[in-house]
Image (cartoon, grey):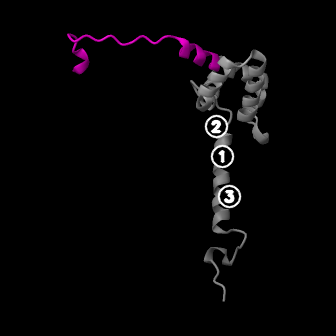
């Protein structure tokens, strides 16, 4: 004789995972309604784009320096498409901004990274008589 789970004996539609999924969906919907359109102080689109681009920044900076401007614009457009508009899961705020504007933001971030990488970093000066660093 097969053994039945007591939670599904009377209501098979409400299995343990079904209830958990329903509760999780309800909380997600509540959070989206509560915080969905609320602008948080200090939270800008550029900050969010920067956070999404950061893991690939080294590769993008290298490609921007090595590729021709035409090829770079193709690579940049492909990157923005894969990062922000993948498989129809585009968030509304990225749709409102548009692909061209996102390309401009990412290009500006990459240009700044290339500029920072090309700036010479001064070597720290030390003196055997200055021991303030050892305190």
Look at 64% across and 56% down and name the residue there: 23
What's the CA distance linking mark 2 and mark 3? Answer: 20 Å
- Above or below, comparing residue 18 to residue 135 in the picture: below
Q: Residue 30 carries which label?
A: 1
Q: Is residue 98 left or right of residue 123?
A: right
Image quadrant occupied by the C terminus = top left
The answer to whether marks 2 and 3 mark residues whose Cβ atoms lie closer than 8 Å is no
In which image quadrant can residue 71 be found? Answer: top right
From the viewer's side, name the closer residue of 63 and 79: 63
Measuring from the top left, give residue 73's x and y in whole percent. Answer: 76, 21
Look at 78% across and 30% down and name the residue there: 95
Measuring from the top left, give residue 83's x and y in whole percent. Answer: 70, 34
Q: Which of marks 1 and 2 is nearer the N terminus?
A: 1
Q: Residue 22 carries which label?
A: 3
Q: Is mark 2 on a helix, strand or loop?
A: helix
Q: Is mark 1 on a helix, strand or loop?
A: helix
Q: Name the residue under label 2.
A: 35
């Amino acid at each position: 004789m097969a053994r039945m789970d007591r939670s599904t004996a009377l209501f098979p539609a409400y299995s343990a995972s079904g209830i958990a999924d329903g509760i999780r969906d309800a909380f997600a919907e509540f959070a989206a309604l509560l915080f969905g359109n609320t602008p948080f102080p200090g939270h800008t689109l550029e900050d969010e784009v920067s956070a999404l681009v950061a893991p690939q920044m080294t590769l993008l900076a290298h490609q921007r320096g090595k590729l021709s401007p035409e090829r770079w614009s193709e690579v940049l457009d492909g990157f923005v498409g894969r990062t922000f508009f993948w498989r129809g899961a585009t968030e509304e705020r990225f749709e409102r901004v548009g692909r061209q504007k996102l390309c401009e933001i990412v290009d500006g971030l990459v240009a700044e990274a290339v500029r920072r990488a090309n700036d010479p970093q001064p070597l720290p000066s030390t003196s055997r008589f200055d021991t303030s660093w050892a305190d």
